[in-house]
Amino acid sequence: MASLRKGKTVLITSTKGGVGKSTFALNLAGIYSTIEKKVLLLDLDLTSGILAMSLNKKYNKSIYEMSEDIKNNVFEDFSNYTLNYNKYIDCIACPKDPRDASKIDLRYIDIIIDQASFIYDVILIDSSHTLSPTNLYLMDKVDEILFVINNDPLNLKSTRSMVSILNNMNISNYKVLLNQSNNPFKDYFSLYDIKNIIQANIDYTLSSEFYIADIDKLIMSGKIVTMSSDIARIYNKDYSSLMNIATDYLNQGSDDNGKK
Ligand SMILES: Nc1ncnc2c1ncn2[C@@H]1O[C@H](COP(=O)(O)OP(=O)(O)O)[C@@H](O)[C@H]1O
Ligand SMILES: [Mg+2]
C-alpha cells in the first residue's frame, strides 16, 4: 500500500568487487520480508548486476526500459516495471544488455528513487564498486550509505582512500560492514587493525560462521538465504546482526543522517 511516509534509501557499495554486496542486499531484503516491511531491491550495478537473476523470476522490463519510458512520456504504473518476488520484495533489474547502461540518464534514476520512496519502506540499492558518476550521484542522493569490506589488505587500503574522499565531500551518513562470511579464511587483521587502517568505525560485522557452503544451490533455485527455515536458529548470531541492521535503517530518521 502506498504511504505518504518516505521510505529509507540505502546504497550498498564497496571499493572492491566480490565482497558480498549483492548477497547481502538479497539477505537484508529477506529480513525485511520476514518482518513484513515492503522493500525494493534496485539493481544499479548497471553493467553486471545479478539481483533479478538471483531471484530467478521472469521479468520483462529493466531500469533501462523504465528510464526510456519516463524520457518518452509513456511511463506506466511503477509496478509494471518491478519483478515481484513475494508480497514484500520487489526488484528493478539492471539492463539485460550491459551496453544500455550508459544510455540511462541519472535524471531518470532520480525520479525512480523518489517515486519508490513513496511505495516502499526501504529501498536497497545494489551498486558496482567503482567511483562511477552513478555511484557519486547515489552517494549524494541516498539517506544511508553502507560500505561492505572484507578482511583483505588491498580492500582495506582502498577503503581508507574512500573514507578520506567522503570526509572531503562532507558525507558522513555512511556505515561500514565487515563481511567475513564470503571469505572465511581471510582473517589476517584484527578489528583494531582494520579500524586503524580504514580510519573509520566498523558498525556491523558478519562473521565467518555465516559462510553458506551451498549458497550456489540456493541461488540456482531463487531462494533467499535469510528466508530459509531454520536459518535464524542455525546462524543465530549473524541473523541477529542482519536483523539489527534492518531495524536500524527503519528507525533512523532521514533528517539526522549527517548530510550537509
Ligand atoms: N555468506 C556467504 N557464504 C558463501 N558465499 C558467499 C556469501 N556471501 C557471498 N558469497 C559469495 O561470494 C561471491 C561474491 O558475492 P557477491 O554478493 O556477488 O559480491 P559483490 O556484489 O560485492 O560483487 C559470490 O560468489 C557469492 O555467492
Ligand atoms: Mg554485486
Image (cartoon, grey):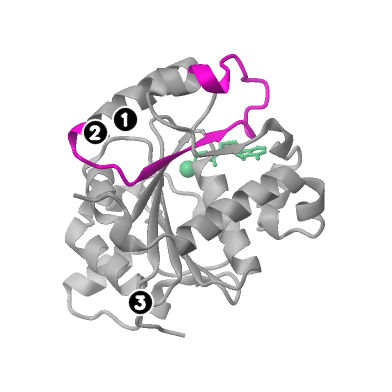
Q: Residues within 10 Å of mark 1 (few under 14, many from 20)?
A: some
- Residue 60 position, x and y percent, is 44, 70
- Please give the residue where the numbered disc 3 appears in the rendered image: 118
Residues under numbered marks 3 and 2 in contact, where contact means CB atoms less than 8 Å apart: no
Badges 1 and 2: C-beta atoms under 8 Å apart? yes
Label 3 within 8 A of ligand 2 by Cβ: no
| Residue drawn at x 58%, y 64% as measured from the top left | 32
Is residue 118 something that shows in the picture?
Answer: yes
Closer to the camera in the image, 94 or 171: 171
Please provide percent x and percent y for residue 189: 56, 16
Extreme residue toward the front, this view: 256
Magenta-tinted stretch: 168-193
Kindly identify which residue carries mark 2. Answer: 167
Dividing the picture into quadrants, the one containing residue 4 is bottom left
Say which residue label 1 marks.
163
Q: Residue at x 63, y 27 (%)?
A: 183
Distance between mark 1 and mark 2 Cα atoms: 6 Å
The reply to whether dot 3 and dot 1 touch (C-beta < 8 Å) is no
- Is 185 included in the stretch rendered in magenta? yes
- Report the amino acid beneath label 2: Asn
Picture quadrant of residue 20 = top right
